[in-house]
Each structure stands twice: as C-alpha cells, then as structure tokens.
Amino acid sequence: MLKGIPNSVSPDLMHALMSMGHGDELVLADAHFPASSHAQRLIRADGLDLSTLLPAVMNFFPIDTFVEDHAVVMQVVDSKQAKPPIWEKFIQILSKSEGDWVNLTPIERFSFYNRAKSAYAIVATGETAFYANLILKKGVVVPDEQEV
C-alpha cells in the first residue's frame, strides 16, 4: 500500500497506467467482455464495478484533449440511439475529473472489439451492467507553467 493510491488500483494497473504513453488506450471492460481473448495485457479487477474503479483510475489518468474519440463505448446492438444507464455514470465521473468537455463516442460492437485488441491493456472488472465497456485514450499531463 502507498499513500494516496486507492486500494482499488492494483499494482498491475498502476504499472500499466504509468507505462502508457499519450495516444495509448486503456479498456475498462465489464464482466461480459471477452477480455482474455482480446488483451495484449490483461489486468484482473474482478471484484470491482466501474463506479468504483473509474474514479480511482481518473485520479491518475489524463484524457487526450486532441481527439474527438477520447472516451469510446460499445454501441447497443440493434439500437444506435439507446444509451444504457451506466453511460450516464461514466459521463458524471469523467466530467468530475476532466471537465464538461468530455463526451462518449459509441462505436459498433465488432469495431469496439477490434479497437480493444490494439489497446495497451484491458482491465477485466466485475461490472455486471450491460454495455459497461469503456475505452479511454491517454493524453498528457501539462506542467502548471506551460500551456498547450
């Protein structure tokens, strides 16, 4: 244990977050997602739901501000307009961390799977809500004295 790091952030997860560079992507996957067969690097967080894990990750993870698709979700099959309730939780957590500019970009199921395969890591959680899969693109931490 270290000071300031929530116990929901495992050593493997912290290592992945620290090892990622800007533009790398992290998948936070629900319990239904085929994480083991899609991951380059698999991190287990089976006992955690995303309402617990996502805020913990956002303590450390800068979102990419230079792209439109900085937070990607899997579009509901057969309903492009549907917005599962978990997505509102994602927006609340991301907005609290990053500001109101954050949005979710839904993409088709198999496009999501393909994108997840190229992600830096997939975190397999115990989240049981449907369509609770989220891909985050890492940005940069800007020193206080610099502007982008």
Image: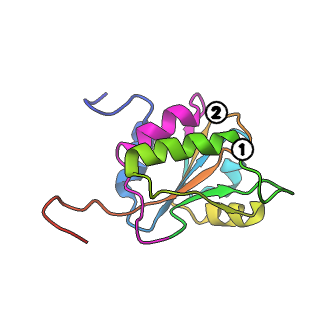
Q: Position of residue 68 (x, y in %)?
A: 52, 69
Q: Is residue 83 left or right of residue 145?
A: right
Q: Position of residue 12 (x, y in %)?
A: 44, 42
Q: Position of residue 64 (x, y in %)?
A: 42, 64
Residue located at (65% from left, 35% from top): 127
| Residue sticking out furthest to the left | 145
**Quadrant of the snapshot with the C terminus:** bottom left
Residue located at (51% from left, 31% from top): 52
Mark sitting on residue 126: 2
Mark 1 and mark 2 lie on one chain; the one further toward the N terminus is 1
Q: Nearer the viewer, residue 85 or 37?
A: 85
| Secondary structure at numbered mark 1 | loop
Q: Which amino acid, by three-letter code, is at mark 2?
A: Gly
Label 1 sits on residue:
84
Q: Which amino acid, by three-letter code, is at mark 1?
A: Pro
Q: Nearer the viewer, residue 110 or 78?
A: 78
Which segment is the magenta one? Answer: 43-67
